[in-house]
Image: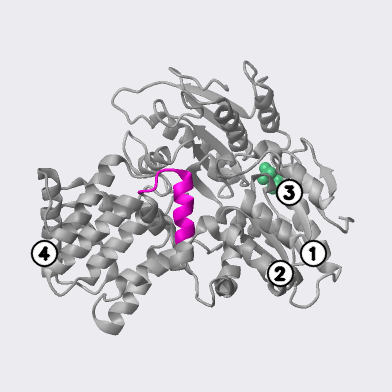
C-alpha cells in the first residue's frame, strides 16, 4: 500500500492479488493523488472477468471513489482509443470494426497463422477494417507515432493495473511498455496460471516486466483466501508436483463415472450437478454459484442442451453459458435479412444463399470450416455468379433456399418481432436441408446470449416507424456488435457452464470439472509435452476457482492421467 512506483504482485490462486490492487487503487484515489479528470485504469482480458472485478470493487470502494476507477478489457480500452484517434494513422480515413463473426467468414480460406495475420493486416490497410487481434498492435503503433496522444493517455491514466499479467501477448506488452514510460504500472501475475500460451503468452513476460520497470515485488506465495479452511489450494499445488495422485482430499472429490445404458452420456454430470445444488441450497439459500467447467466448446454446448432438457428423470436446469458469439450472431443476421424480405422471392433467395455462405464460413469462429464446407461455399458462391450448380446435394440446398424464400415472400408478418422471428426460424428448421437447419439451431443459442430483449426492441422500433422490418439486418448486426464491449454487471449467482479457459480469474461456491469419454478430454491423446503442461495448469486454474468444494468427473474407462 505504501509503494509509490511500479509494482508487481505475485501469488497463487485466491491469494488476494485482485483484492490488494483494488484496495491500492482506493488508497490512491482517497489520498488525492489524482488530478480532476484523471482515472485509474484496471485492465483485464475477458468481459466476464471485468464484470466480476467491478462487482468486487463496488463492495470495496465508495461510489464516489468507484467513479475514479475505469475497469475495462484490453479490447474495450484499445478500441476506444482507436475509434477516436485511429484516423491519425489512416490519413484521416476512419476505422471500422470487423466483428468476429464476419472476420471468421472472411478469413476462412486462409489456412496458416501467417496468412491469416497478413490478411488481417491487408483488410486494415486497404479497407480500414480492423480485426480484434490487431487492436493492441495498432494502438501501440498509434501511441508511438503520436507523442501528443501518448502524453494525453498517460495524463488521463497515471496508474494502470494489469490483471492476469502472465497472459499478456507480445502486442499487449508493447502497448504497456509504451504507456508505462510515464504512467505507473501495477501488474498482478501468477506464472502457474499462464494458460494462454496459444495466443502469445510467454513464460518470460514476468521477468521482462521486472527488468524493464524495476518494480517493487510482492509475493503472496500460496496464501489462499478464496477457499480458506479447505484443501482446494493444496490440491491445486499438489497437481503441479503430481503428489495429488493417490491422496485423499476433503474438498476435492474425484469421481470415475461409468456408462449408463439408455441414458444420455452426460447423465453422471447432471447427477453430480443436482448433488451440488442440494448442498448449496441447504448451506447458502440463494447466495451460491456453481460452475460446470469442460475442456471444449462442443462439450459446453452439449452440456447446456442437456441441462435445459427434462429427460432421464431430471428437471430442466436454468443456467448461463459462456458462448462464442459467431454462430448465433451470423444466424441472427441471416434471420434478420429474411425478416426484411424483398421485392421478389428470387431476390430473397439470392440474399439467403449469400448469407448461408457467410454463416458456413464463419460459424466456427477462429476454427476453420472443413474442406467439404469450403467446397460447398465455393459452389454456392459460383451459383450466385453463374446461376448454375452441380451435384444433387448442392442442387437440393439451392432448391430448399428457394422454397424458404418463396414461403417468406408469401408470409404475412404480424409486427410482433418475437412471433415473426420464430416463424422465420421455423421456416429454416423445416427446410429439410442440414446447412439451413443449422442456422435455426444456432439461432436458438441467442437466448443464452441474453440479447433477445435488445434485438426485439430494435426490430420493434423498425416496425413502428415503417410497418416493415426494412433495415433489420443492419440493426441486428449493430445490436450484436455492441455485445463485444459491454461490460455490464452480470450476476454471478446460479449455474454457469463454460470452458476451463474461460473460468480464469473467476470464483464460484462450487466447481464441477467434467471431461468426456471420447472428445473433451482434459489431456487429449497424442498431446505434446508443452500441451500436457498447459493442460495441467488449466486443470489447476479450474479447480482453484472453487471456494467450498470442487468435483472432478473423469471416465472410469480412460481416467485423466493427472488424477
Ligand atoms: N486479505 C484477505 N483477507 C480475506 N479475504 C481476502 C483477502 N484477500 C482476498 N480475499 C478474498 O479472497 C478471494 C480471492 O481473492 P482475489 O480474487 O483477490 O485473489 P486473486 O489472487 O486475484 O485470485 P486468482 O489469481 O485466482 O484470480 C476473494 O473472495 C477475496 O474477497
According to the picture, the residue beneath numbered tag 4 turns out to be 406
**Quarter of the view holding residue 248:** top right
Instruction: Identify the main secondary structure in magenta.
Output: helix
What percent of the width, then of the height, locates residue 134? 54, 58
Marks 1 and 4, how far apart at CA: 63 Å
- Residue at 16% x, 63% y: name it: 349
N-terminal of the pair, mark 3 or mark 2, is 2
Marks 2 and 1, how far apart at CA: 9 Å
Q: Are marks 4 and 2 in contact (CB under 8 Å)?
A: no
Q: Are marks 2 and 1 in contact (CB under 8 Å)?
A: yes
- Residue at 17% x, 67% y: name it: 348
Count of marks overlaid on the render: 4
Residue count near mark 2 (Cα–Cα under 10 Å), binned few <14, some 14–19, many ≥20 = some
Q: Is residue 213 left or right of residue 170?
A: right
Q: Is residue 427 left or right of residue 457?
A: left
Q: Is residue 561 left or right of residue 393?
A: right
N-terminal of the pair, mark 4 or mark 2, is 2
Disc 2 secondary structure class: helix
Q: Which residues are magenta?
A: 109-122
Quadrant into which the N terminus falls: bottom right
Q: Are marks 3 and 4 in contact (CB under 8 Å)?
A: no
N-terminal of the pair, mark 1 or mark 3, is 1
Amino acid at each position: 500500500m505504501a509503494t509509490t512506483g511500479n509494482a508487481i504482485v505475485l501469488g497463487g490462486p485466491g491469494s488476494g492479488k485482485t483484492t490488494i490492487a483494488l484496495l491500492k487503487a482506493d488508497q490512491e484515489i482517497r489520498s488525492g493523488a489524482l488530478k480532476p479528470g484523471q482515472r485509474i485504469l484496471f485492465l483485464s482480458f475477458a468481459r466476464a472477468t471485468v464484470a466480476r472485478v467491478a462487482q468486487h470493487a463496488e463492495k470495496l470502494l465508495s461510489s464516489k471513489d468507484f467513479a475514479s476507477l475505469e475497469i475495462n478489457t484490453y479490447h474495450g480500452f484499445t478500441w476506444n482509443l482507436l475509434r477516436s484517434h485511429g484516423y491519425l494513422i489512416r490519413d484521416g480515413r476512419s476505422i471500422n470494426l470487423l466483428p468476429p463473426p464476419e472476420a471468421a467468414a472472411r478469413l476462412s480460406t486462409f489456412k496458416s497463422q501467417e496468412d491469416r495475420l497478413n490478411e488481417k493486416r491487408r483488410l486494415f490497410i486497404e479497407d480500414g477494417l480492423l480485426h480484434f487481434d490487431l487492436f493492441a498492435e495498432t494502438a501501440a503503433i498509434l501511441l508511438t507515432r503520436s507523442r501528443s496522444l501518448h502524453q494525453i493517455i498517460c495524463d488521463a491514466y497515471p496508474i494502470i493495473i494489469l490483471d492476469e499479467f502472465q497472459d499478456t501477448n507480445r502486442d499487449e506488452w508493447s502497448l504497456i511498455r509504451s504507456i508505462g514510460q510515464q504512467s505507473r504500472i501495477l501488474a498482478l501475475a501468477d506464472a502457474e496460471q499462464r494458460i494462454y500460451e496459444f495466443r502469445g503468452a510467454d513464460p518470460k513476460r514476468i521477468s521482462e516486466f521486472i527488468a524493464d520497470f524495476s518494480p517493487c515485488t510482492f509475493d503472496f506465495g500460496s496464501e489462499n483466501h478464496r477457499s480458506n479452511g479447505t484443501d482446494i489450494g493444496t490440491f491445486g499445488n499438489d497437481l503441479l508436483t503430481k503428489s495429488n495422485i493417490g491422496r485423499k482430499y476433503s474438498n476435492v472429490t474425484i469421481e470415475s463415472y461409468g456408462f449408463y445404458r439408455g441414458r444420455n452420456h452426460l447423465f453422471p454430470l447432471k447427477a453430480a450437478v443436482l448433488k451440488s445444488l442440494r448442498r448449496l441450497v441447504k448451506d447458502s439459500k440463494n447466495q451460491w454459484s456453481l460452475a460446470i467447467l469442460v475442456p471444449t466448446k462442443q462439450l459446453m454446448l452439449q452440456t447446456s442442451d442437456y441441462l435445459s432438457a427434462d429427460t432421464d428423470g431430471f428437471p430442466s436446469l436454468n443456467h448461463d453459458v459462456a458462448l462464442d458469439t459467431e454462430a448465433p450472431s451470423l444466424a441472427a443476421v441471416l434471420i434478420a435479412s429474411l425478416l426484411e424480405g424483398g421485392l421478389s422471392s428470387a431476390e430473397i433467395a439470392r440474399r439467403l444463399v449469400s448469407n448461408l455462405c457467410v454463416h458456413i464460413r464463419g460459424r466456427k469462429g477462429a476454427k476453420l470450416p472443413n474442406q467439404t464446407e469450403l467446397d460447398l461455399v465455393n459452389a454456392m458462391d459460383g451459383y450466385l455468379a453463374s446461376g448454375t450448380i452441380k451435384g444433387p446435394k448442392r442442387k437440393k440446398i439451392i432448391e430448399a433456399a428457394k422454397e424458404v424464400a418463396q414461403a417468406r415472400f408469401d408470409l404475412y408478418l404480424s409486427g410482433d418481432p418475437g412471433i415473426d422471428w420464430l416463424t422465420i426460424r421455423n421456416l429454416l428448421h423445416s427446410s429439410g436441408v442440414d446447412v439451413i437447419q443449422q442456422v435455426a439451431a444456432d439461432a436458438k443459442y441467442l437466448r443464452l446470449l441474453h440479447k433477445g430483449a435488445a434485438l426485439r426492441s430494435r426490430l420493434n422500433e423498425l416496425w413502428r416507424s415503417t410497418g416493415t422490418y426494412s433495415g433489420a439486418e443492419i440493426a441486428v448486426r449493430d445490436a450484436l456488435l455492441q455485445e463485444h464491449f459491454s461490460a455490464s454487471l452480470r450476476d454471478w449467482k446460479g449455474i454457469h457452464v463454460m470452458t476451463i479457459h474461460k473460468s480464469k480469474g473467476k470464483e464460484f461456491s462450487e466447481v464441477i470439472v467434467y471431461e468426456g469419454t471420447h472428445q473433451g478430454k482434459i489431456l487429449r491423446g497424442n498431446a505434446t509435452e508443452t500441451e500436457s503442461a498447459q493442460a495441467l495448469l488449466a486443470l489447476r486454474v479450474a479447480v482453484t476457482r472453487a471456494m467450498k468444494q470442487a468435483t472432478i468427473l473423469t471416465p472410469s474407462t480412460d481416467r485423466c492421467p493427472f488424477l
